[in-house]
Amino acid sequence: MFDDKFFDDWLDSQAQKVMEKVASGEGIAPEQMMILMLKAQTNHFTHLDVDLRNEMVLLREDMNKRFEQVDKRFEQVDKRFEQLTSRIDHFMIWSFATTVSVGAVIVTVIKFL
């Protein structure tokens, strides 16, 4: 809808004409003062945009570092669950072996009685 480059070029040329008048000591009309104000505002917005983009880059880097830390924590929790699962598996094997052994002893004792 609106070409920023066209507008910027027009505003630059108009602001340059007004600044030439000011430099030569001529007075300027309110409309010309508005052009200077508009130019100042567009410069300010441009600087704000650059600053905001830089802040977003820093924020993104900080977020990436934090996500990496969270990933490391999840990996640690995953390792702990693996250890716990291994312990439970060993306990189940021991429990089953003990139950079978005690059952065999009981059956043997009952057969001899």
Image (cartoon, rainbow, N blue to C red):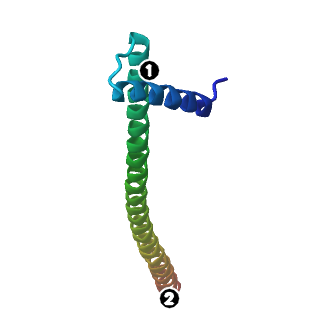
Q: Quadrant of residue 72?
A: bottom left
- For residue 10, above or below residue 82: above
- Residue on which disc 1 sits: 35
Residue 67: give x, y in percent of width and height.
Answer: 42, 57
SS at circle 2: helix
State whether residue 83 appears in this view: yes
Which residue is labeled 2 in the image?
A: 112
Between 86 and 15, the one lying in front of the other is 15
Query: At x 42% / y 62%, what residue is drawn?
Result: 68
Residue ranking furthest to the right: 1
Residue 113 seen from this side: no
Between 67 and 64, which is closer to the camera in this rendering? 64
In the rendered structure, find residue 59 and report the number of the disc placed on it: none
In front of the other: label 1 or label 2? 1
68 in relation to 26, above or below:
below
Q: Residue at x 52, y 81 (%)?
A: 107
- Which element is circle 1 on? helix
